Image (cartoon, rainbow, N blue to C red):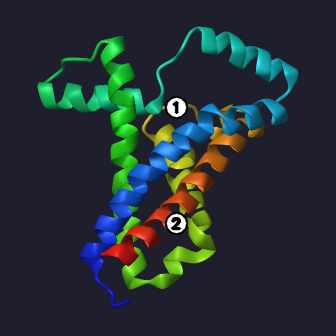
């Protein structure tokens, strides 16, 4: 197959969007069960209490920050943040997939590990570095190590799904 960055970007964008959905499904199903299995009973009890009182996540905070910046200070209501958070997640997932798809055309080594390396890089860059640096969530050192198990696995699922869908769509283009 001939290298074509534009087609790679389109395939990557589609793949990133699909992978974002699969990642969400993983987090609410197997990822949730995995998190419970690796945490202490005390951490599971704390999480159960917190799930009764949902908190604002990084995507919701990002959506509110974008709206506040664009509108000169207006903020989203809680309901609007709940709706806008997933849009931020899909936009970020699609963008990362598009970048990945373009890079995969130029440097095949980017696809190493069938997307596992890509998923790990996204987890490290976003969850471990950017989210705490931008004050969108706690630092990894402020949490038990087990708190990162399910999010990391979700990013591995995202990476593998992105590579699978990217290959499939790219073969069609």
Name the mark nearer the viewer: 2 or 1. Answer: 2
Q: Position of residue 164 (x, y in %)?
A: 52, 66
Q: Which mark is residue 117?
A: none
Pick whichever, 31 or 1, lies toward us.
Answer: 1
Q: Secondary structure at mark 1?
A: loop
How far apart marks 2 and 1 lie (CA) works out to 30 Å
Q: Residue at x 18, y 20 (%)?
A: 73
Residue at horizontal 28 percent and vertical 74 percent from the top: 7
Mark 1, residues whose alpha carbon is within 10 Å: few (<14), some, or many (≥20)?
Answer: some
Which residue in the rendered view is the most extreme toward the front? 172
Quarter location, residue 121 = bottom right
Locate residue 172 relative to residue 66 in the image: left or right.
right
Residue 102 % position (x, y) = 34, 73
Q: Is residue 123 left or right of residue 37?
A: left
Quadrant including the C terminus: bottom left
User: Residue 98: x percent and y percent?
Assistant: 34, 63
Q: Which of the two residues, 1 or 71, is positioned nearer the viewer here?
A: 1
In the drawing, does residue 54 fall left or right of residue 98? Answer: right
Q: Which residue is mark 2?
A: 164
* Disc 2 and disc 1 in contact, CB within 8 angstroms: no
Q: Earlier in the sequence, mark 2 or mark 1?
A: 1
Q: Which residue is mark 1?
A: 137
Is 159 above or below relative to 103?
above
Q: Return the residue found at the far left.
A: 71
């Amino acid at each position: 197959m001939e290298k074509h960055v534009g087609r790679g970007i389109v395939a990557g964008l589609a793949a990133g969007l699909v992978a974002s959905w699969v990642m969400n499904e993983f987090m609410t199903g197997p990822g949730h069960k995995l998190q419970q299995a690796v945490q202490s009973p005390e951490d599971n009890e704390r999480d159960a209490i917190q799930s009764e009182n949902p908190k604002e996540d990084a995507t919701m905070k990002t959506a509110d920050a974008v709206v506040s910046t664009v509108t000169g200070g207006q903020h989203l209501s809680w309901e609007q943040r709940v709706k806008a958070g997933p849009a931020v997640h899909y936009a970020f997932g699609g963008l990362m997939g598009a970048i990945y798809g373009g890079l995969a055309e130029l440097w095949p080594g980017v696809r190493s590990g069938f997307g596992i390396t890509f998923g790990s890089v996204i987890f490290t860059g976003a969850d471990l570095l950017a989210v705490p640096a931008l004050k969108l969530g706690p630092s990894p050192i402020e949490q038990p190590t087990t708190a990162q198990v399910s999010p990391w696995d979700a990013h591995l699922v995202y990476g593998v799904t992105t590579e699978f869908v990217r290959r499939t769509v790219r073969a069609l283009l």
